[in-house]
Amino acid sequence: MAFPAYPLVNGHRFSWVSINAIFGLIPIPILGLKSINYSSKLTPGKVRGTAPQVIGRTRGEHDAAGDFEMLRLEWELFKTQLGLAGMGFGETAFPIIVQYAEVLTPVPSPVITDTVIGCRITENAASNQEGTDPAMIKCTLDVLDVLWNGVSIAFPDKVAF
């Protein structure tokens, strides 16, 4: 992917409306999404030996996390899909595919696809208040990995057979 020319004149940068999120075992786009957040972290260990200075580091440990907030009706449909496996909706693992694209511009952007792998819902909460805001459900996720446009922060060199 080439770097964009600066300043970007004939196009737009990615924004919330550039995102298409596809959830679940039976991939369905969720339009009633208010937020989607995910992260990867690789924490190397420090090797000191008998020296007071750090003399090296280990590859580290990888952790990933995520959360999302969606409208209550979309949540009910998605929750029902997760329950089809015959387990609780927090026991069913599912992927989330997040695509970024700006196509309605004179210069269409490349499509960037992040994949949040092995999501399980660990916490969910309702958000309701007086006023005109819609009813929302916020879910916290336990995530196995995030592929940032196809690449993980850590290389999975150990594969179980």
Image (cartoon, helix red, strand yellow):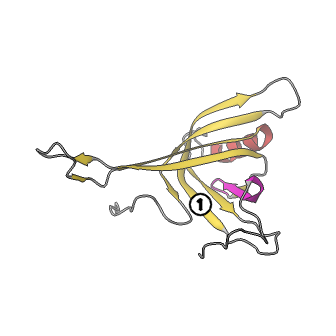
95 sits left or right of 57 in the view = right
Q: Nearer the viewer, residue 67 or 53?
A: 53
9 sits left or right of 160 in the view = right
Question: Disc 1 residue type?
Answer: Asp
Q: Residues within 10 Å of mark 1 (few under 14, many from 20)?
A: many
Measuring 64% from the left and 53% from the top, which residue is drawn there? 24
Q: Nearer the viewer, residue 52 or 17?
A: 52
Above or below residue 49? Residue 161 is: below
Q: Quadrant of the N terminus?
A: bottom right
Q: Is residue 84 visible?
A: no
Measuring 78% from the left and 27% from the top, which residue is drawn there? 128
Measuring 40% from the left and 58% from the top, which residue is drawn there? 154
Residue pushed farthest left?
Answer: 50
Asked which quadrant contains residue 148, the reply is bottom right
Q: Is residue 118 magenta?
A: no
Residue pushed farthest front?
Answer: 7
Above or below residue 104? Residue 67 is: above
Measuring 19% from the left and 52% from the top, which residue is drawn there? 55
Above or below residue 23? Residue 136 is: above
Disc 1 target residue: 114
Give, as a single range, the part of the protein colored magenta.
16-26
Q: Quadrant of the C terminus?
A: bottom left
Residue 97, percent from left and from top: 63, 58
Residue 134, percent from left and from top: 83, 34
The number of numbered discs placed on residues in the rendered structure image is 1
Q: Secondary structure at mark 1?
A: strand
Q: Is residue 23 visible?
A: yes
Q: Nearer the viewer, residue 148 or 120?
A: 148
